[in-house]
Every structure is written in C-alpha cells, then in structure tokens.
Image (cartoon, helix red, strand yellow):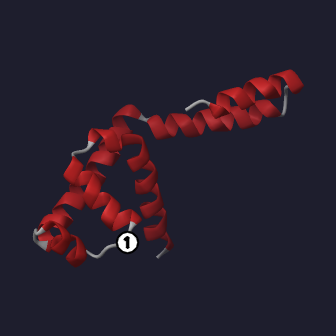
Amino acid sequence: MSENIDKKAYYAILFEYYKDLLTEKQVETFICYYNEDYSLAEIAEEFSISRNAVWDTLKKVVSLLKYYEDKLKLYSKDQLLKNYLDDLKKHVDAEGENIIRSIEEME
C-alpha cells in the first residue's frame, strides 16, 4: 500500500518537471487521475472515451515521465543539488548562507 503512495507521489513530482512535454490530453488525464482522484470510469465519462483508453493513456504518461527522467534527470539533479546545499550550509558563514538561500530560491 505505501509503495503505491510512494509511486503516486513520485509520478506527481515527475509530472511537475515534464508536463510541458506531454500532450494536452495526457496532462488532463493525469491531473484527473493523480491529482483529483477521479476513477477510470469518471475520466472515461468526462472525455467520452473507454476506460481502457484512459488506462492506456495513464500507462503511457507514466512511461513517458520515467523515460524523460531517465534521459534528462532533472529531478535527480535537483535532489542532488539540494543535498549538496544542505551539506554546504554546515561549512559556511552568514554570507555563504545568504548565497545558498539565493540559490535555493532560484527555479
């Protein structure tokens, strides 16, 4: 059960990084299922498609998100940078902390 929650959270994070690389239909389907907690039947009814088509779209989106992260590694690099900055905070003075804070505020 917790593994499913972890996967869902991971996909939601990846979605924030890579949603601009998805089609509008893929984005809408993902949001309905993962963010708004719609069932497959509710999404199918909303978009006038079959439940199977919804499921196929969701599988494709998850596959694409994993593929993009595997190739681009934006999330992994962000996490690594965050870890480095956290470690660096232990070794800098007030001026260094201000610089780190500035880096953390960058998007």
Q: Quadrant of residue 58?
A: bottom left
Nearest the eye: 83 or 97: 97
The residue sitting at 17% across, 62% down in the picture is: 56
The residue sitting at 80% across, 33% down in the picture is: 89
The residue sitting at 50% across, 39% down in the picture is: 76
Q: Image check: 23 left or right of 33?
A: left
Q: Residue furthest right?
A: 93
Query: Residue flagged by tag 1: what amino acid is it?
Result: Asp
Q: Position of residue 42 (x, y in %)?
A: 24, 76
Q: Image check: 34 left or right of 53?
A: right
Q: Quadrant of residue 79?
A: top right
Q: Position of residue 99 (x, y in %)?
A: 75, 23
Q: Mark 1 falls on what kind of element?
A: loop
Q: Position of residue 103 (x, y in %)?
A: 66, 27
The residue sitting at 77% across, 30% down in the picture is: 88
Nearest the eye: 104 or 1: 104
- 30 versus 92 height, above or below: below
Q: Is residue 106 visible?
A: yes
Q: How many marks?
A: 1
Q: Position of residue 105 (x, y in %)?
A: 65, 33
- 31 versus 48 height, above or below: above
- Quarter placement of the C terminus: top right
Q: Image check: 105 left or right of 24?
A: right
Residue wearing tag 1: 37
- Within 10 Å of disc 1 (Cα), the crowding (few <14, some 14-19, many 20+) is few
Q: Is residue 93 visible?
A: no
